[in-house]
Image (tube, coloured by chain):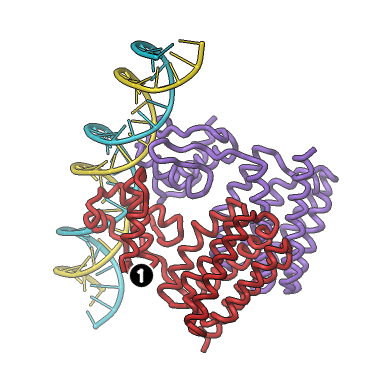
Chain colours: A red, B purple, C yellow, D cyan
Amino acid sequence: MALEDVQVESVEAGQSLADRLFVTLRGEIVEGLIPAGSKISEPELARRFNASRGSLREAVMRLESLGLLERRVNVGARVVDLTERGLLELYDVREALEGMACRLAATERTGEDLDALREMLARHEQQEELQAGRAYFQPEGDFDFHFRIVQASNNDLLIDTLCNRLYYRVRMYRYQLGMASPRAKSAFREHSNIIDAIEAGDGELAEILMRRHIRASRLNIEKKLTQ
Amino acid sequence: MALEDVQVESVEAGQSLADRLFVTLRGEIVEGLIPAGSKISEPELARRFNASRGSLREAVMRLESLGLLERRVNVGARVVDLTERGLLELYDVREALEGMACRLAATERTGEDLDALREMLARHEQQEELQAGRAYFQPEGDFDFHFRIVQASNNDLLIDTLCNRLYYRVRMYRYQLGMASPRAKSAFREHSNIIDAIEAGDGELAEILMRRHIRASRLNIEKKLTQ
DNA sequence: CACATTAAGATTGTCGACAATCTGGAGTCG
DNA sequence: CGACTCCAGATTGTCGACAATCTTAATGTG
């Protein structure tokens, strides 16, 4: 798939070379084109992109701060390993942060936020009917849902933490461990209930529902892992 | 002042020059020696530390990923502004994450964790008795408390997010807006109750208590700001 | 006098090169 | 045969220089 090309070209001009390298590499790591656990060779990648090592280094450092790479002094960078423990840790952090995002969204959301959420939900319902029971393509649909809720929280720190820092790790696990939960039907209903609570301005309920929703996914994963 | 030299030399060997620059600059930004909102001049700082601009650039980029600097392409980096809104956003994120850390600490804590928490609490109690009601055992004492709870959560992602990413921002606000809450007495009791819940293994209660504790600080700040 | 234009200066982005350090394997010794 | 030493190769950390871009202040024009 040419997703990385899309991403590269979708970057408007006025971005630095290091920015584009960062976005490209981020995509390849998330999708596994650069395998988890593999070593990052600065000279090799610099040659591949016809860039200097310095620009590529800047991209590598940003990937490190995203938590997608681990660097050791005088040794170099490696793509992080995907572990069961890391996946479960991610769920706990998301439960806390997205729960709070939901609570805030219930009081801070604007009319446009609600319209967008409703429109998105309708689109997902349509998809679900078409695919009748088959995991309505969670990866993007679920991603959209959580992404937009967070946006409606109106807390820039929360938005940055979830959307710019944690979600690439989430996507990396989804792509490579293929943990799209087969909970399509129930997940859709949960999404719907969450949006109802947000619309009603009930932050407490919205938070509880979101936390249950994420915890249910986590339990589902745990069950798969232990069997 | 030779503060930067002290900090630089206190870093053990085997660290890169960029690492040391990063630690030094981080300290100066947190303490306000480099004022909030001020521009970062790469050539000037490079001269000041007798380092190349490249090494200093690496430190600047890490500070950006910490959220202490904001960079714009072809313009440069500025220290973030301290705003009331930013402070309140920080409290909401901390409430969510430290609440979860508390919940996890209650089930994941080891015997050493509990010993360390108890020992720390006893030390704080002693300080409090000495200072009898006066506020400022908080800045470091409170920091210690929250820091150690997070460590006991045994969730590396949570630990990294709070201790390596958010706490420098917390400290920056504390140093420069001086928001050490005058809640010493009640805060100490709350700390004590939280540790009790962790010791009892009651994650649900521990989370609730920590969230209330942080929310009380937030309300206290809000009251100060609006008056 | 206000506003647009332009040129000078400085700053950032990018690059290639050198020195310090690590990695892996050949060789040697117990 | 296993463990240690040491060397060659490659990689990373650091540096200074050049080109592209922005900022600022002076200049010109309505």
Please determine whether, in this image, residue B61 is positioned above or below residue A147: above
Q: Dot 1: few (<14), some (14–19), or many (≥20) neighbours within 10 Å?
A: some
Relative image position of residue A8 (x, y in whole percent) = 33, 56
Q: Quadrant of residue A79?
A: bottom left
Residue B25 x/y as whole percent = 50, 40
- Examine the image and state in which quarter residue A93 appears: bottom right
Query: Mark 1 belongs to which subunit?
Result: A
Q: Which residue is mark 1?
A: A32
Q: Relative to residue A150, is residue B18 depicted above or below?
A: above
* Position of residue B198 measured from the top left corner of the image (x, y, whole percent): 73, 69
Identify the residue shown where x is 57% and y is 57%: A151
For mark 1, give the secondary structure: loop
Residue B127 appears left or right of A144:
right
Taking the image as drawn, is residue B112 in sight? no
* Residue at figure coordinates x 40%, y 61% from the top left: A69
Is residue A173 visible in the rendered image? The answer is yes
- The residue nearer to you, when weighing B103 against D14, is B103
User: Quick check: C1 above or below B192?
Assistant: above
Tell me the residue at 64%/50% (across/down): B90
Which quadrant would the N terminus of chain A be assigned to in this image? bottom left
Q: Residue at x 55, y 53 (%)?
A: B165
Q: Disc count in the image?
A: 1
Nearest the eye: D25 or A219: D25
Q: Nearer the viewer, residue A206 or D28?
A: D28
* Left or right: A41, with B68 as reference point: left
Q: Position of residue A154 (x, y in %)?
A: 62, 52
Instruction: State left or right for residue C8 relative to residue A171.
Output: left
Task: Specify the amino acid type for callout 1.
Answer: Gly
